[in-house]
Structure formats: C-alpha cells, structure tokens
C-alpha cells in the first residue's frame, strides 16, 4: 500500500447524496478479485448511456476534470452493500482522497484498509469546496500529516482522524504490512513454541 502524507491535485465536485456501492461499481464488474481495471466501471450508470456512450453532461466526463485525484461528494457516501470493490474502483480511476460530510461505516473502514483517505468535514465546508472545484484545473491540498484541506483560494479546513489509522496511512501499512512489522516477534514466538511444545510442529 502506498503511503499517504500529502496530496496536491484537482478535485471533482459530485453533488449527489446517498451514492451507494452498487452505483459506485455495479454488479457486472464484480467478477474479478483483481484491483486493476475496475476504474472503467466506476459510476458506470452515471457516466454512460444504455449504448455505452459517455454522457457529456456528467461531471466526470468533462475534460477539465480528467486526472483529478480528489472526489468531493455528498452525504452518506458509500452506503449499501459492503463490497470492497468500491474503494478499489475509486483508486483505480485515480482518486486518492474523498471529502464528504459522512460515509457508510463499512465503506469508510474499507477505504482505510486500501489506502484511500476519506475526509469528513461539515456539510457547509464541503459545499464551499465544491463551489471552488467548479470549472476544474484548481489545485486542492489534502494534508494528512497536518490534518487539513486547503482550497485553491487558500482557505484551510481542519479534519479529525483516528491516530492509529493516520499512522498506518502515512506509513503505507495495510493489514499484511502491519503484521510484517512484527515478523521478528513472530519468529521468536514460533521458536519458543517449537522448543516448549514440539509435538505441535509435528502435527502441522
């Protein structure tokens, strides 16, 4: 998992509340456990018509938002089923941080597990950021180390985050990486068990 310390990038204002995980990545894209390639299915029904053609009026299809890495979203983002493909699709599309007033709990937890930063700010502040994101080509800063979002106009918005989750993101530690940090302790434990209870090793 890549470390997340500070991000400078364009932002997309997606002013829609209650976007669920089925809308984020529809069921037809769930046939794989690979994380790569899922970006093509992100918000598929919003982005494409029935013939598979891009909808020019949808904000992600507008050229000024291509390459954006911050998604500014509405309330209760990521509600619905617990599919981990949702943060995978967001990240494969290019997003590294989301800013919203609230998230569904399971989606929120899945974001941290995969290195995607979900920032929570009051709705009024989210609306300010959405207004500044209109038109694209404006650089936003999401600074996890300082726990602030800085808008293109220079306004600073502070956010709270669990210290343990913050540390893991900054160090780029997923569950496996966190376990590997204790590899020497695990080795010593296994060596002690092999001496104290050797029959366990034979049984395995």
Image (cartoon, rainbow, N blue to C red):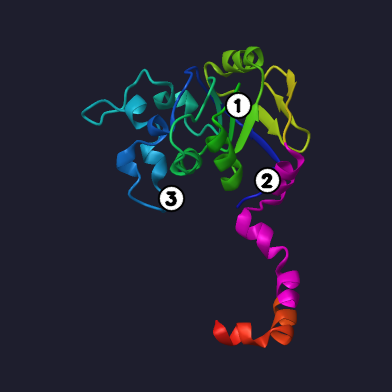
Q: Residue beneath label 1, please? A: 99
Q: Residue beneath label 2, please? A: 169
Earlier residue among tags 1 and 3: 3
Quadrant of the snapshot with the C terminus: bottom right
Question: Magenta residues, as a range?
Answer: 162-189
Residue 139 falls inside the magenta stretch: no
Q: Is residue 40 above or below residue 157?
A: below
Left or right of 78? Residue 168 is: right
Q: CA distance from mark 1 to mark 3?
A: 23 Å
Residue 136 in percent (x, y) is at: 53, 21
Q: On the image, which quarter does residue 179 sit in?
A: bottom right
Give the camera-side residue of 139 and 114: 114
Marker disc for residue 10: none
Residue at image location 51% in from the left, 41% down from the top: 91
Q: Dot 1: few (<14), some (14–19), or many (≥20) neighbours within 10 Å?
A: many
Residue at image location 57% in from the left, 19% down from the top: 133
Marker disc for residue 36: 3
Earlier residue among tags 3 and 2: 3
Secondary element type, mark 1: strand
Q: Is residue 31 above or below residue 149?
A: below
Give the camera-side residue of 190 and 203: 203
Secondary element type, mark 3: loop
Residue 24 in percent (x, y) is at: 42, 32
Residue 169 falls inside the magenta stretch: yes
Asked if disc 3 and disc 2 are in contact, CB closer than 8 Å, the reply is: no
Q: On the image, which quarter does residue 202 sit in?
A: bottom right
Q: CA distance from mark 2 to mark 1?
A: 16 Å
Q: Is residue 45 above or below residue 133?
A: below
Q: Main secondary structure of the magenta part?
A: helix
Asked if disc 2 and disc 1 are in contact, CB closer than 8 Å, the reply is: no
């Amino acid at each position: 998992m890549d470390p997340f310390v500070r991000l400078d990038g364009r932002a997309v204002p997606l002013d829609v509340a209650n976007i669920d995980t089925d809308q984020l990545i529809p069921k037809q894209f769930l046939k794989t456990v690979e994380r790569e390639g899922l970006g093509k299915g992100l918000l598929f029904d919003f982005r494409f018509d029935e013939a598979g053609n891009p909808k020019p009026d949808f904000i992600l299809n507008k050229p000024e938002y291509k390459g954006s890495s911050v998604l500014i979203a509405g309330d209760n983002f990521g509600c619905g089923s617990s599919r981990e493909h949702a943060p995978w699709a967001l990240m494969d599309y290019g997003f590294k941080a989301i800013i919203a007033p609230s998230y569904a709990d399971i989606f929120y937890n899945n974001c941290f597990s995969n290195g995607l930063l979900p920032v929570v700010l009051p709705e009024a502040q989210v609306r300010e950021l959405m207004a500044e994101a209109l038109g694209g080509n404006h650089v936003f800063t999401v600074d996890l180390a300082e726990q602030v979002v800085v808008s293109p106009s220079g306004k600073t918005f502070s956010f709270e985050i669990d210290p343990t989750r913050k540390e893991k993101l900054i160090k780029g530690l997923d569950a496996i990486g966190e376990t590997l940090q204790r590899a020497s302790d695990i080795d010593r434990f296994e060596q002690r068990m092999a001496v104290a209870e050797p029959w366990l090793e034979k049984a395995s």
